[in-house]
Amino acid sequence: MSQFYLRKVRVILKGSAGSKVINPGDSTDDQLQIEFSVSKTMSSTQNTASIDIWNLAEATRNAMGKEFDRIELEAGYISPDDVSTVGTIFIGELRDVEHTRERDDIITHFECGDGDAAVRRATISKTYRAGTPVKEVVEGLRAEFEKQGVTRGELKGLDDLPPFKRPYSMCGSCSREMDRLSRQHGFQWSLQNETFETVPADGHVGGMVLLTPDTGLIGVPTITDKGVKVGALLNPQIRPGRRVRIESHVLEMNSEGGVYRVASVTFSGNNRSGDFKASIEGEKIASGKVDKGVK
């Protein structure tokens, strides 16, 4: 999509009361004002979101943290020809809810974490026999996350890992055990919108987003020792562990450019004014693999 136009932000609240949609449909008229900042990384560090909503109904405010304890955030653009790029940029649980008054407005502020219940509650106590494939152990841990509402995503970088030479025991937090496994065997794991994923240290998952001045590239990319930092108009398809292709004269002049793996992305925006963008840190991909030696 080469033309971006109207901003759309939608919030879905979920819990024992069912679900409630804030700013439903594709209309950009009469939206409640919503501001957000979402930080996502392909590491095991939890993704987080800060969300402000102006003038929620009193009954909805009173239900927050009680009848509603989960949140989904969707954002994107709707063009004049009704083509939509709106998509999910965060799914998680409410950590804290505050209501403040500014003149005639009541602003509800949410702090949220991706997969909070799974990170806090998923535990394991099990010993695997010698010769067990690493993937089988990872699947055992993933199954414990699934009991806390996490779904199965792409599991890459596990099939070719050598099996355990000795019995392997685990006891305690599944997140801590996944950190230990990933360090020992050279892959990364994360929860992305409450979906469990693994990525090879030098690999990627999913598709690729093209970034040019006509498709959302903002300003001039900055070359780093790992790859690039770049800004773009908000696009939900930009996700950690996925690829972006960046076309920029600055990168070409420095013999850079091409394809990068998204190491982290921050979505920030307000459906009324100000920012509505993605800030990306990317790692250079050469010959199909992440180039750890980029200077």
Image (tube, rainbow, N blue to C red):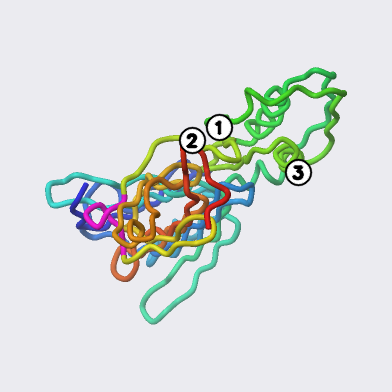
Contact, CB < 8 Å: mark 2 with mark 3?
A: no
Q: How many marks?
A: 3
Q: Mark 2 = which residue?
A: 205
The residues colored magenta run 211-218
Badge 1 element = strand
Q: Nearer the viewer, mark 3 or mark 1?
A: 3
Q: Mark 1 = which residue?
A: 151
Residue type, label 2: Val
Residue 178's disc number: none
Question: Which badge, 3 or 1, comes first in the chain's sequence?
Answer: 1
Q: Which quadrant would residue 181 be assigned to in this image?
A: top right
Residue 49: image location, x then y, percent: 51, 57
What residue is at 18 percent from the left and 51 percent from the top? 79
Residue type, label 1: Thr
* On screen, residue 199 above or below 52: above
Q: Mark 3 = which residue?
A: 176
How far is disc 2 from disc 3 in space, using C-alphas? 23 Å
Q: Is residue 212 magenta?
A: yes
Residue 92 can be seen, yes or no: yes
